[in-house]
Structures are given as structure tokens and as C-alpha cells.
């Protein structure tokens, strides 16, 4: 995954935008990321990743490395991310959203 790949596929918000938003605004509550172009407010697929990024930015500041390097090993491949979202959306359509999480409760 590269920093300019989309994290929120519903609203076309890149990893770069979300990570910079978290860093610059010292975000500690994942639901606050929804203020970044609506990330996480669609199908919900990206919410777990947003929650992880909020934690990772707190634990490992971005300062001395490129965002692509920082993101390496912290995100799935773009293909896996898209395929996971398609499965998530199929599950939602079938009414079995076991895998979704509540952004407002994290
Ligand atoms: S991928 Fe982010 S809300 Fe659907």
C-alpha cells in the first residue's frame, strides 16, 4: 500500500490525507477522523484500519521517514483492501455484518 492509495474507498480518501489529519490534529478518538472528508462514514470497511492508524500515529510519530516507508507493514495491499471491502459489502447486503465495527464506540 502506498500513501496515495485510497484508505476510504467510499469517499476516495487516501492514506496520506487520513494519516496527516490524525498527526496534525493530534487525533486520539477514531471517530474524529470522519471530519476528514467523511472517511469511515460509508460502508464501514475502513474503520478498523482508521482505528489502527490513530493508535500507530500516537505510538510511532511520522517525523523522520517518508509516509510510504512509515505505512509499509501497517496496511494491507491495495488489492487485498479492495477485495476485503467487496466481501464486507456483500456481507452487509446479505445482513451478516459480523465483521463491521462501530466507529463511535472506539
Ligand atoms: S471504505 Fe471507508 S466507509 Fe466504506
Image: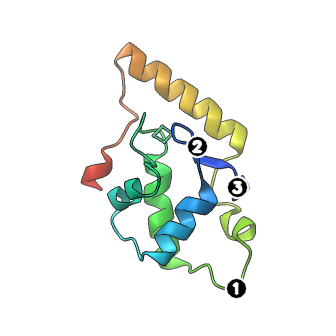
* Left or right of residue 1, residue 25 in this image: left
Residue, disc 1:
64
Q: Secondary structure at mark 1?
A: loop
Q: CA distance from mark 1 to mark 3?
A: 18 Å
**Mark 2 CB near ligand 1 (8 Å cut):** no
Per the model, the C-alpha gap separating discs 3 and 2 is: 10 Å
As drawn, the residue found furthest toward the top would be 94
Question: Which numbered disc, 2 or 1, marks the residue closer to the eye?
Answer: 2
Residue 42 sits in which quadrant? top left
- First of labels 3, 2 by sequence position: 3
Q: Quadrant of residue 73?
A: bottom right
Q: Residue furthest bottom?
A: 64
Residue 101 screen position, x and y as percent: 35, 42
User: What residue is drawn where x is 63% and y is 34%?
Assistant: 82
10 Å crowding of disc 3: few (<14), some (14-19), many (20+): few
**Where on the picture, by quarter, is residue 70?**
bottom right
Residue drawn at (45%, 66%) of the image: 54
**Mark 2 or 1 closer to N-term?**
2
Asked if disc 2 and disc 1 are in contact, CB closer than 8 Å, the reply is no
**Apparent side of residue 82 relative to residue 47 in the rendered image (left or right):** right
Q: Which mark is residue 4?
A: 3
Scheme of colours in the image: rainbow
Residue 16, position as x, y percentages in the image: 63, 61
Q: Categorize mark 1 by other alpha carbons within 10 Å: few (<14), some (14-19), many (20+).
A: few
Question: Viewed as shown, does residue 97 lie left or right of 18?
Answer: left
Q: Position of residue 103 (x, y in %)?
A: 33, 49
Q: Which residue is mark 2?
A: 12
Within 10 Å of disc 2 (Cα), the crowding (few <14, some 14-19, many 20+) is: few
Name the residue at 63% across, 30% down: 83
Amino acid at each position: 500500500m502506498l500513501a496515495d492509495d485510497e484508505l476510504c474507498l467510499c469517499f476516495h480518501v487516501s492514506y496520506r490525507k487520513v494519516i496527516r489529519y490524525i498527526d496534525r490534529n493530534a487525533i486520539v478518538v477514531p471517530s474524529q477522523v470522519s471530519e476528514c472528508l467523511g472517511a469511515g462514514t460509508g460502508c464501514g470497511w475502513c474503520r478498523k484500519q482508521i482505528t489502527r492508524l490513530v493508535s500507530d500515529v500516537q505510538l510511532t510519530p511520522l517525523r523522520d521517514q517518508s509516509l510510504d516507508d512509515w505505512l509499509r507493514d501497517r496496511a494491507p495491499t491495495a488489492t487485498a483492501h479492495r477485495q476485503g471491502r467487496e466481501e464486507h459489502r456483500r456481507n452487509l447486503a446479505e445482513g451478516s455484518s459480523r465483521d463491521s465495527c462501530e466507529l463511535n464506540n472506539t
